[in-house]
Image (cartoon, rainbow, N blue to C red):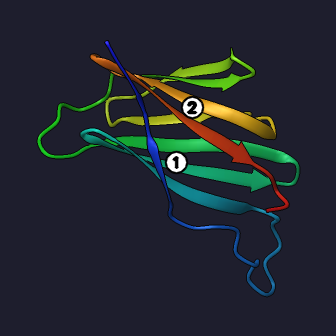
């Protein structure tokens, strides 16, 4: 088993709400790069809640990552886990604010990336 760190590529940051928008929904998009995979992560912020939606996409002929297990880690402990579906999509419905890590277990490797979100960036 190979343990790897993912590189983080910011795709966007908080943007001002559109004029006249009634929702307080904000989002941040990130792309995590690991060997033959791109992990697209969308952090959705609504009021004081955060959700993570994402998809693991293979590059260069890599096998799909539909069996990937994903974990949110805080202070060295797993606080939430999920599994990617047949399209490589995953969701964490509740994400606490603060320093977290996203751990992805693929067939032949484990990768970890730091996620530290704050509504006041």
Outermost residue toward the bottom? Answer: 19
* Secondary structure state at the residue bearing disc 1: strand
Whether residue 93 is visible, yes or no, is no
Residue 15 occupies which quadrant of the picture? bottom right
Q: Residue at x 57, y 31 (%)?
A: 102
Q: How many marks?
A: 2
Labels 1 and 2 touching (C-beta < 8 A): yes
Whether residue 4 is visible, yes or no, is yes
- The answer to whether 15 is drawn above or below residue 40 in the figure is below
Report x, y in % for residue 1: 31, 12
| Residue corresponding to mark 1 | 41
Q: Residues within 10 Å of mark 2 (few under 14, many from 20)?
A: some
Report x, y in % for residue 59: 21, 46
Which of the two residues, 25 or 64, is positioned nearer the viewer here? 64
Report x, y in % for residue 74: 73, 24
Which of the two residues, 29 or 110, is positioned nearer the viewer here? 110
Q: Residue at x 80, y 67 (%)?
A: 23
- The answer to whether 92 is drawn above or below residue 53 in the figure is above
* Secondary structure state at the residue bearing disc 2: strand
User: Tag on residue 100?
Assistant: none
Which of the two residues, 53 or 9, is positioned nearer the viewer here? 9
Left or right: residue 3 versus residue 53 is left
Query: How far apart, in angstroms, are the residues tagged by discs 1 and 2?
Result: 10 Å
Q: Quadrant of the C terminus?
A: bottom right
| Residue corresponding to mark 2 | 102
Which of the two discs, 1 and 2, labels the residue nearer the N terminus? 1
1 or 2: mark nearer the eye:
2
- The answer to whether 118 is drawn above or below residue 90 in the figure is below
Residue 99 occupies which quadrant of the picture? top right
Left or right: residue 112 versus residue 116 is left
Report x, y in % for residue 38: 35, 46
Q: Residue at x 49, y 34 (%)?
A: 90
């Amino acid at each position: 088993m190979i343990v790897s760190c993912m590189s983080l590529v910011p795709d966007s940051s908080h943007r001002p709400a559109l004029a006249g928008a009634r929702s307080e929904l904000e989002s941040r998009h990130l792309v995590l790069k690991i060997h033959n995979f791109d992990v697209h992560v969308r952090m959705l912020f609504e009021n004081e809640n955060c959700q993570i939606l994402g998809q693991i996409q293979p590059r260069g002929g890599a096998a799909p990552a539909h069996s990937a297990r994903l974990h949110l880690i805080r202070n060295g402990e797993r606080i939430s886990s999920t599994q990617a579906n047949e399209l490589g999509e995953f969701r964490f419905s509740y994400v606490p604010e603060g320093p977290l890590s996203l751990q992805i277990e693929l067939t032949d490797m484990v990768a970890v990336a730091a996620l530290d979100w704050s509504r006041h960036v």
